[in-house]
Amino acid sequence: MAETLKKGSRVTGAARDTLAADLKKKYDGGASIRALAEETGRSYGFVHRMLKESGVTLRGRGGATRGKKTSGAS
């Protein structure tokens, strides 16, 4: 996939549909948007937009949350 896309080139028609399906499959399989962007040579925003167009439910950012901290000592 990455070999056929030149950075900055437009992706339209069947190639866009194929790329969107491939990104969706990999994202649903656990790949991050950043990893997909690096793999395809595209920007984070491009991959994010393609996933949204494909109807993917995007995951949360993960990492630490800002909820209340629980302490073992009371």
Image: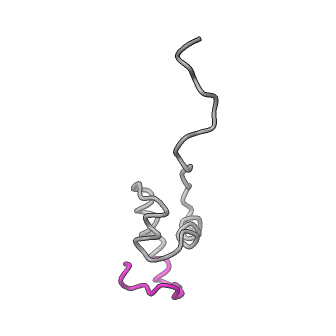
Give the answer, above or below, for where 61 lies relative to 19. Answer: above
Give the answer, above or below, for where 52 lies relative to 14. Answer: above
Q: Residue at x 40, y 62 (%)?
A: 26
Q: Residue at x 48, y 64 (%)?
A: 34
The percent position of residue 45, horizontal first and vertical second, equals 58, 70
The percent position of residue 64, horizontal first and vertical second, equals 55, 41
The percent position of residue 4, horizontal first and vertical second, equals 38, 85
Quarter placement of the N terminus: bottom left
Give the answer, above or below, for where 71 lies relative to 15. Answer: above
The percent position of residue 55, horizontal first and vertical second, equals 57, 62
Q: Write down the region rendered in magenta.
A: 1-18
Q: Which residue is at the front of the view, 62 or 14?
A: 62
As drawn, the residue found furthest toward the front would be: 73
Q: Quadrant of residue 56?
A: bottom right
Q: Residue at x 43, y 64 (%)?
A: 35
Name the side, left or right, on which 5 lies relative to 72.
Answer: left
Quarter placement of the C terminus: top right
Q: Quadrant of residue 5?
A: bottom left
